[in-house]
Image: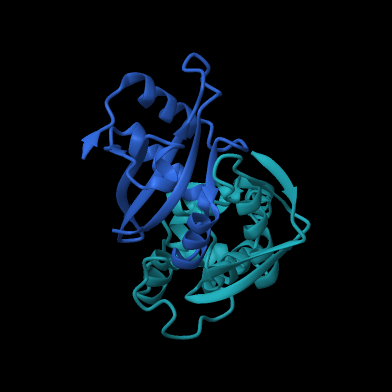
Chain colours: A blue, B cyan
Amino acid sequence: MAPLDDQILLTAYTNALENRRFEGYVMWAEVALHWIRRELDGVTANAISSLMYEHVASGGKIDQVAETRPEWRHLYPFHYDLRFPILGREIYIETRLIFDNPEDPDDPVILVANIHDR
Amino acid sequence: MHPIAAESYSVEVKHDGKVHEIQLENIEIPTCQSCGERVLGNDVDEAVTRELRKKLNLLSPQQIRGRLRELGLSQKEVAHELGVAEATLSRWMTGSVIQSRALDRFLRTYLALPKVRTLLKAKLQAPDFGLGTLEEGEAVLPSAMRDSRQSGHAT
């Protein structure tokens, strides 16, 4: 898996995470939010977005993976995956980056499509 | 994203090893225009947390922050005396992590009773703390003073 090293995409991804405390910058697919609340005792989705930010801000790896699933491929060419431990569990987080204007730091949105144990 | 009015929304939330059913009423949940999937934001996550705290009678982040401010206590000293990491207390105070019921009760007791705070300051390192019943008044004496009193040395 190739790390995300495109500077424009990386900046957009980081901008979305920097805005995580405001509504609409990090969004959760229902399945992802349900998994967090059902599996990670006492942890909120907002806490996960903060951990994602800490991971990226400290130079943690983001994998850029070409989307192969036919139902998603026409919508998003790539998904961006993070892996780091939470409560002693190795967790995989699959995200999509949505943005139109690379010049606008308030434009990018991250959709967390899935999250589960590795 | 298209907002839609949901009749109600339910989610299972694990807390202290037990799963609780949380039901939210009249909450708007956007749907992705491209894929049709329901997409949830901070507002839903926070509403779920608020309902869980209400159901389990847990202190809210605002209540914890307010009480620390009223008492003039720093996060650092409270975390030290409760025996939790400062980052843990900070997460309770921002609401990103929900404290366990046991720690919520300990925190309430600590915040409600000045004697408990004094006692913890004085006895935190005493190996026999909790192994016997303290005499009234003894609770507020630092262990160094008590030890010197017992051995007959004036301090």
**Which residue occupies the extreme top position in the image?**
A103
Give x and y (percent) for residue A97. Answer: 44, 34
Q: Is residue B134 visible?
A: yes
The N terminus of chain A lies in quadrant:
top left
Give x and y (percent) for residue B9. Answer: 68, 62
Q: Quadrant of residue A40?
A: bottom left
- At 55% from the left and 35% from the top, the residue drawn is A25
- At 55% from the left and 55% from the top, the residue drawn is A30
Q: Is residue A91 left or right of residue B3?
A: left
Q: Is residue B140 visible?
A: no
The C terminus of chain A lies in quadrant:
bottom left
Q: Which residue is more in the foreground, A85 or B104?
A: A85
Q: Is residue B110 left or right of residue B81?
A: right
**Which residue occupies the extreme left position in the image?**
A1
Give x and y (percent) for residue B123. Answer: 44, 68
**Which residue occupies the extreme bottom position in the image?**
B132
- At 53% from the left and 48% from the top, the residue drawn is A28
Q: Which residue is more in the foreground, B4 or A9?
A: B4
**Can you say whether A37 is above or below A101 in the image?**
below
Give x and y (percent) for residue A107. Answer: 55, 24
Q: Is residue B38 left or right of residue A5?
A: right
**Can you say whether A86 is above or below B153 in the image?**
above
**Can you say whether B7 is above or below A24 in the image?**
below
- At 69% from the left and 67% from the top, the residue drawn is B23
Q: Which residue is more in the foreground, A39 or B50?
A: A39
Q: Is residue B60 left or right of residue A91?
A: right
Q: Quadrant of residue B107?
A: bottom right
